Amino acid sequence: MRIRKGKIDEVDFGLLLQKNRSYRRFDQDQPIDRATLVELVELTRRCPSAANRQPLKYAVVCSPESNRRLFPCLSWAGALTDWDGPAEGERPTGYIVILHDQTICKDPSFDPGIAAQSILLAAVERGLGGCMFGSIDRERLRDEFSIPNQDAIPLVVALGVPAETVKLETTLDPASIDYWRDAEGVHHVPKRPLSEILIQW
């Protein structure tokens, strides 16, 4: 839901979750501006934090030159072994680098995951999409952007206007959970059925 001046506009949260997929191909002709990324950080600033310590910081990246430097620091789609990541023209137009200030606390608990998911949900609600990355060349990223040693790099969120279709489907084979692409380029994501994940006590 969206709250504006005391009024609540209903949003179909189930639909929002369905649309919040890991998008890996984007329309580079529709760039994200810095103000939009800062707005996403401002929303995320209000999220819960373990013991309310709030050890996370955020760096927003959206200039073509900075995007070019950040892109090779990420590993794309490990299950698609014949794909090296999006080609020029299909790459993210913005990034939010989530940093953990270790001088505030040594363990950020679940804060990075909460922050990344919140960023992505807010992005989808604005017609954007993204993908969170834990597979990062952290030393390269640290060197490229002169990130202080006190700041760990738990996650990076890549963002843009999606240029691919992602389809969810239920798998009945626990061994078949790798995502894949069909001949038309549709990205298929198998999900375990409710009957497998819901424990009866």
Image: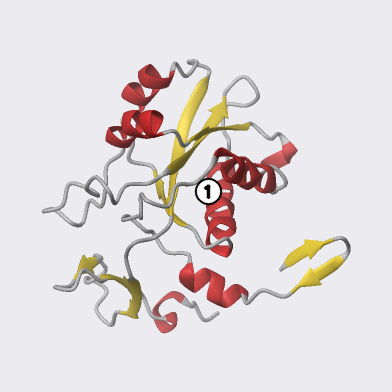
The quarter in which the C terminus is drawn is bottom right
Q: Is 23 above or below relative to 101?
A: below
Q: For mark 1, does the 10 Å Cα neighbourhood hold few (<14), some (14 to 19), or many (20 or more) residues?
A: many
- Of all residues, the one furthest to the right in this rendering is 6
Q: Secondary structure at mark 1?
A: helix
The quarter in which the N terminus is drawn is bottom right
Q: Name which residue lies at 61% across and 41% down.
A: 35
Quadrant of the rendered structure where residue 37 is? top right
Side of 75 where 57 appears, left or right: right
| Badge count | 1
Residue 15 place in picture, x, y as percent: 54, 76
Q: Which residue is disc 1 drawn over?
A: 116
Q: Is 157 above or below relative to 120?
A: above
Foreground residue, 200 or 11? 11
Foreground residue, 94 or 42? 94
Mark 1: amino acid: Ala
Q: Name which residue lies at 39% across and 60% down.
A: 162
Q: Name which residue lies at 58% across and 64% down.
A: 125
Foreground residue, 160 or 30? 30
Residue 147 place in picture, x, y as percent: 47, 19
- Of all residues, the one furthest to the front in this rendering is 29
Residue 56 place in picture, x, y as percent: 61, 33
Is residue 172 visible in the rendered structure shown here?
A: yes
